Image (cartoon, rainbow, N blue to C red):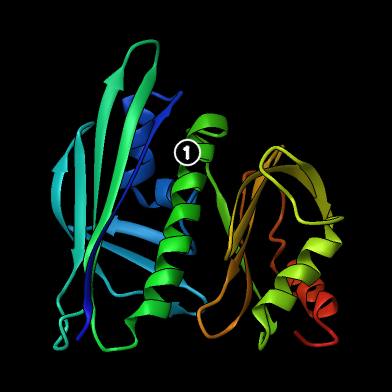
């Protein structure tokens, strides 16, 4: 049966159209808010994540400072995902940025994948806004770490929240592992924390582990540190 979808997100950010354009249309810019490592070259957006490659996405529109769009090829089963970004400069160096994600998920069991995609996109757009508001123009180092396989997600989130001192809300200051910062976003499957030189994110892996998908703006690669932290956190299973 499958499911066609369109998911819009919009925010006014304290950043210039040039800073927004850099963040949505270049590899280093995308690295600062999505996941993994991205490159934009020869009209294609490519992203490497978790030791693999996401499906390449062909650029379908590139109007500098106004519109950037790209889409994966349609698979035999009809699956594809397309992204469109609209940029509108406002006064006093602020910009309205709109992201619309659309596509098609095949099969009769599309609901769980759609839920995971929706919650993840909410986090990624919130991270884009946070990046533009606090770190615009800075080069990022993406860090990805995977915890053990999760079999009970409510328990897994309770375990993580307990490590923070309880379920957090946006605006709360928390300490998680070696990091301390302010919660900037939380939904049922993600958590984002802004530190002085990093954006720390925890994502519910689809049919997999808890994922630490952090963005660092200073310092060394923290991947092994976070992998060890997740292993210890979930040593008793979840």
Examine the image and state in which quarter residue 118 appears.
bottom left
For the N terminus, give its image quadrant. Answer: bottom left
Residue 191 on image: x %, y %: 63, 56
Q: Nearer the viewer, residue 202 or 38?
A: 202
Establish if 16 lies above or below 2: above
Residue 140 on image: x %, y %: 55, 48
- Residue at 31 percent across and 17 percent down: it is 90
- Residue at 75 percent across and 41 percent down: it is 172
Residue 105 on image: x %, y %: 26, 78
Mark 1 sits on what residue?
129
Tell me if 175 is positioned left or right of 93 in this view. Answer: right
Q: Nearer the viewer, residue 86 or 42?
A: 86
Tell me if 63 is positioned left or right of 238 in this view. Answer: left
Establish if 93 lies above or below 37: above
Examine the image and state in which quarter residue 218 appears.
top right
Examine the image and state in which quarter residue 81 appears.
bottom left
Badge 1 element: helix
Tell me if 125 is positioned left or right of 76 in this view. Answer: right
């Amino acid at each position: 049966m499958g499911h066609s979808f369109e998911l819009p997100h919009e925010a006014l950010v304290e950043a210039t159209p040039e800073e927004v354009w850099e963040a949505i249309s270049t590899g280093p810019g995308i690295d600062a808010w999505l996941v993994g490592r991205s490159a934009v070259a020869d009209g294609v957006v490519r992203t490497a994540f978790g030791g693999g490659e996401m499906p390449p996405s062909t650029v379908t529109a590139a109007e500098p400072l106004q519109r950037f769009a790209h889409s994966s090829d349609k698979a035999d089963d009809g699956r594809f995902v397309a992204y469109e970004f609209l940029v509108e400069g406002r006064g006093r160096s602020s910009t309205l940025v709109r992201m619309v994600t659309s596509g098609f998920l095949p099969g009769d069991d599309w609901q769980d994948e759609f839920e995971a995609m929706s919650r993840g996109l909410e986090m990624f757009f919130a991270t884009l806004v946070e990046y533009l508001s606090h770190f615009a123009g800075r080069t990022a180092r993406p860090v990805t770490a995977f915890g053990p396989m999760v079999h009970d997600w409510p328990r897994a989130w309770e375990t993580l929240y307990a490590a923070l001192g309880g379920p957090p809300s946006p605006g709360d200051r928390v300490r998680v592992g070696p990091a301390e910062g302010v919660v900037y976003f939380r939904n049922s499957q993600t958590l984002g924390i802004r530190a002085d030189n990093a954006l720390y994110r925890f994502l519910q892996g689809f049919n997999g582990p808890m994922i630490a998908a952090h963005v660092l703006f200073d310092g060394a690669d923290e991947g092994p540190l976070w992998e060890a932290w997740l292993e210890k956190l979930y040593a008793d299973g979840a």
